[in-house]
Image (tube, rainbow, N blue to C red):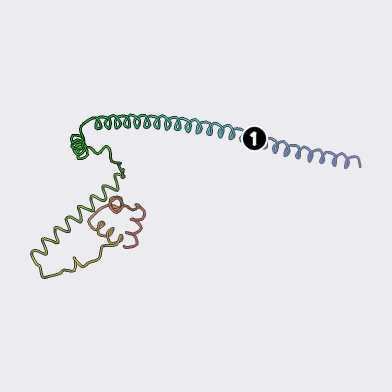
Amino acid sequence: MTIILIAVLFILQLISFYFLIILNTKLAKFKDLEKKQERLMREMDDTISVYLAEMKDENDRLIQELQRVSKSETQTNAVKKEEQMVEQEQPPSLAKEESTIEGSISLDHEPRIYVPKNIVANAYSRQQQTGVKAEAKVVHSAQQPTETTEKEEAKPLTLEQQAIELAKQGKTSEEIAKQLQKGKTEIELLLKFHN
């Protein structure tokens, strides 16, 4: 009977050691998790502080730029006032002649409208294309004034048709996308669906 009791006690002691080992590993994992979270929080703090420093630098640059622009505006306003004072001192006939001469030469007094380069380039290329087409129509109509061709009555090509025509000319999807002002993937899909 004592042997059974000793065996049971030994087995219970082994089981308790097993549970202690499991508990210790869980505690170690929890401590590792805590360390990882602390490290992540430090990294986030560092990232946010760097971001805030960059924002502060950007704001400082913006303020400096605005101050520079406002100084230049005040200088131009001062120059305009001086010109007006000089015009008022001159005889009326000279002032009118000078203002018409300055108005025809100088565009500084008119507001300027800034348009992105790609829009201007596309408008220019369209204007060139329509100009060439109009010249061709004039030449063609001068040669055959009574005949009307299907090309003159044809509707403008759709985006898909334009893409296909450009692809037939041997252009890449990137070139087609740039010319048609569409995304490269969109052009690739159009071409794939057509084939």
Residue annotated with mark 1: 32
Relative horizontal placement of residue 22, taking residue 124 as reference (left or right): right
Residue at 26% across / 51% down in the picture?
123
Q: Is residue 102 left or right of residue 65?
A: left
* Quadrant of the snapshot with the N terminus: top right
> How far from the left and from the top, in percent, is residue 103?
22, 39
Q: How many numbered marks appear?
A: 1
Q: Nearer the viewer, residue 195 or 116?
A: 116
Furthest residue to the left? Answer: 143
Q: Quadrant of residue 96?
A: top left
Nearest the eye: 175 or 17:
175
Q: Quadrant of the C terminus?
A: bottom left
Residue 44 placement (x, y as % from top left): 56, 35
Residue at 61% x, 35% y is 36
Q: Position of residue 180 (x, y in %)?
A: 29, 54
Three-letter code, disc 1: Asp
Q: Residue furthest right?
A: 1
Which residue occupies the foreground of this view, 173 or 50? 50
Q: For mark 1, does the 10 Å Cα neighbourhood hold few (<14), some (14 to 19), or many (20 or more) residues?
A: few
Q: Callout 1: helix, strand or loop?
A: helix
In the image, farthest residue toward the front: 91
User: Residue 119: image x %, image y %?
Assistant: 29, 48
As drawn, 28 above or below 182: above
Q: Residue at x 66, y 37 (%)?
A: 29
Front-most of residues 93 and 143: 93
User: Quarter-wise, where is residue 149 in the image?
Assistant: bottom left
Residue drawn where x is 42% and y is 30% of the image:
61
Question: From what the image shows, is residue 133 above or below residue 46?
Answer: below
Q: Is residue 33 left or right of residue 178?
A: right
